[in-house]
Amino acid sequence: MAASFSQIKCSPMIHVFLGPNPSRPSSWSPLSSWRPVKVTMSCNQKSYWGSINEDIEAHLKQAIPVKESLSVYEPLHYLTFAAPRNTAPALCVAACELVGGHRDQALPIASALHLMYAASYTHENLPLKESCRPKSMIHHKYNPNIELLTGDGLLPFGLELLARSDHPTKNISDRVLRVIIEITRAIGSQGMIHGQYHEIESIQSNGNSSGNVEEIGRVCEKYEGSLHACAATCGAIIGGGSEEEIEKMRRYGLCVGKIKGMSNKLKGNDKELVKLVEELSSSAMEELKGFNESKVEAISGFIEGNFLYD
C-alpha cells in the first residue's frame, strides 16, 4: 500500500510507457509494442495528488486495524492494501474540493470506493489453478476460499464506512444516501460487474487478445468509466455541488475512466484508439469550464499532458 499511495516526487516532466495496468491482467491486452507517452504535470499537481493519496491511506489504516479476531482482520487488512492503486478514490476527493467541499467530507467515500475496488480486484484475481485470467501480480498469503470470503467482507465494510460518515449535526443524510445509491449502482450489474462480464467474454472468445476498439470501449466504459464517474459524482454530491456541477463531474469522471482504461489497453498500431482517447481528453476538459480556475488546475492533472504520441 505504501507503494500504491505514495507521494510522487516532483519533477517538471515524466516519461511513462503505456503498458498493461497492474490492476488489470496484462494478458487482456498484450501490446505489440510499448510506446513512450510524454505527460506533463506541474509540481503542484503532483504534490496535490500525493497528499490526497496519503490522506486516503491514513483513513483506511485507521478504519481497518489488525485486531481480534486475527483470522478475520488480518486478511481483511492485507487484501485492502494489496490491491493496486486506483485513481477513482483520489478523483472523489478532488471533485469534492472542486465544488467547495472539505477534504474530510470525502475521505470516507474515497476509502469506501477503494474497498469496493479492492473487493473486485480480489475476486478477479483469486489464486485458482484453472482460470481464464493470468496469474495475479500480488502475493497471495491466503487460500482461494479465504480470499473469496474476505473480498465478500470488504463490500459491506465499505458501505458501513459510508453510513458512519453521516452525523445528525452535519445535516447531510440526504447526500450520504444519494452517495450510497450511486456507489451500489456503479459496482453492480449496471457498472463494474457488467464490464467484468464483457471482459471475460472477450478473453474467452478472442483467445486473450484485446479485441477491437468497440469491445475495448464497452469494457472500459462499464468498468473504469463507471467507477470514475461514480467517484467524481459522489465527491460533488458530498461537497454540496449544484445539480449542474454534479452532472459535469459525472461526465468528467466517465471520460477520465475511459481514458485510463483505454490507455492501459492501447496497442501501438491502433490509430483509431489513439484518436478516441484524444477526443475523450478534449471532452473531459470541456466539463471543467465554469469551475474555479485555481481548483481546475489541480483536478485537470488527471488528463493534462494530452497523451502526446510519437
Image: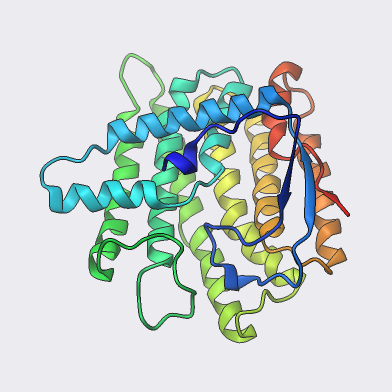
Q: In the figure, 148 relative to 255: above or below?
A: below
Q: In the figure, 98 relative to 40: above or below?
A: above
Out of 207 and 163, give the one closest to the viewer. Answer: 207
In the rendered view, does 187 fall on the left or right side of 73?
A: right
Q: In the figure, 226 relative to 298: above or below?
A: below
Asked whether the viewer can see residue 83, the reply is: yes
- Residue drawn at (25%, 63%) of the image: 142
Image quadrant holding the C terminus, namely: bottom right
Out of 268 and 223, give the one closest to the viewer. Answer: 268
Please provide percent x and percent y for residue 242.
62, 24
Q: Residue 95 falls in which quadrant of the image?
A: top right
- Residue drawn at (33%, 52%) of the image: 79
Please provide percent x and percent y for residue 94.
59, 28
Please provide percent x and percent y for residue 165.
35, 28
Out of 95 and 184, give the one closest to the viewer. Answer: 95
Asked whether the viewer can see residue 175, the reply is: no
